[in-house]
Image (cartoon, grey):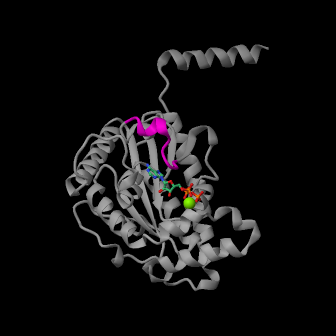
Amino acid sequence: MIKQKDVDYLRVKPGKKIDLKDFNTEWDKLKKFEAYGSDTLKEKVNLLLQQNLTDLTKAQQLLYADDRYSLLIVFQAMDAAGKDGTIKHVMSGVNPQGCQVYSFKKPSLEDVEHNFLWRYAKCLPERGHIGIFNRSYYEDVLAVKVHPELLRNLPEGKRNKAFWQNRYEDINAFEQHLYRNGTVILKFFLNLSKHEQKKRFLDRIDKPEKNWKFSAADLTERACWQDYMSAYEDAINATCTEWAPWFIVPADNKWVTRALVAETITSTLKSLDLNFPKLGKDQADLLVKAREALAKE
Ligand code: ATP
Ligand code: MG
């Protein structure tokens, strides 16, 4: 199994400034996988994933029964980094009744008539549940920072460094509020290389069954790659806190991404003091009586 210390390697330390150039997007640059050859990688990593999915199923059941915490999982990445596939695989073993996935696209007119956190606040997971945000309020300091013309209907003022700093502070305060109320937050940046994105786009263009996944906007956003990388760096540096950590996950190999994300989620849930609710005396008596009644039938 990937040990806790291995996922700690992905965790950004609060207060430590990161530079995305220092982070590998490739699996074979990761120490923990160096013993695997590329031939056996998929098979071995798949085994790790399966083990974690089994543990995750049990941990989710306990989260639901315990009913004190909720888990919010945020996925952010460039296009084709594998958010959808990761969500599909990692959540394949969980009970759909205890899990909700929200994919956030461009905001609606109603959304922009409200503060920028409004539409996300409506989708937060209730206690006992896992909520997944496929894109999130971070778009409001990523896509919107790269394309400031998207800012509409706001009071006058400069859209300068202080403006974005205020948004980071709003996000930190929002996440701290959630944390203090029992929401555990995990934020994943799937770190894809520009080179691998090109390969995946070409694959989507070349394979008819994948054509639907490609959109013209994919190339316009790719053209802003460097701006996005700076926006990601600034956002991660400003919002990596003890109460809402960021994990930077290598994304050039889909199997490795899925295994590392599954391990992080599973080990986080296991680290919570989750318990099945203890029966009160009244309820214990009720069970004894019910058993007697059923035995008499
Ligand atoms: P896929 O491409 O796999 O369908 P996706 O998440 O990329 O998934 P798209 O419809 O392609 O979905 O893109 C959604 C777009 O909406 C992204 O370019 C994203 O930056 C943009 N977006 C999301 N939230 C906001 C926001 N709050 N403000 C502005 N743009 C946003
Ligand atoms: Mg897209």
Residue 296 left/right relative to 5: right
Picture coordinates of residue 208, whole percent (x, y) = 76, 69
Where residue 169 appears, x then y in whole percent? 25, 48
Say if the magenta span includes residue 108: yes
Whether residue 165 sits left or right of residue 232 in the image: it is left
- The residue lying at 63 percent from left, 42 percent from top is 96
Identify whether 218 is placed above or below 272: below
Look at 79% across and 14% down and name the residue there: 297
For the residue pair 152 and 163, the one nearer the viewer reads as 152
Q: Can see residue 275?
A: no
The answer to whether residue 34 is above or below residue 97 is below
Q: Is residue 121 visible?
A: yes
Choose top left, top right, bottom left or bottom right for residue 187: bottom left
In the image, 100 versus 296, the foreground residue is 100
Q: Which residue is depicted at the point 52% across and 50% down?
A: 105
Picture quadrant of residue 37: bottom right
Of 187 and 92, nearer the camera is 187
- Residue most toward the right? 297
Which quadrant of the figure has residue 229? bottom left
Number of numbered discs visible in the structure rendering = 0
Residue 227 % position (x, y): 36, 68
**Magenta range:** 104-114
- Give x and y (percent) for residue 120: 44, 41
Along the horizontal axis of the image, is 243 left or right of 62? left
Determine if the magenta segment contains residue 137: no
* Residue drawn at 67 percent across, 19 percent down: 291
Would residue 75 appear left or right of 181 to someone viewing this image?
A: right
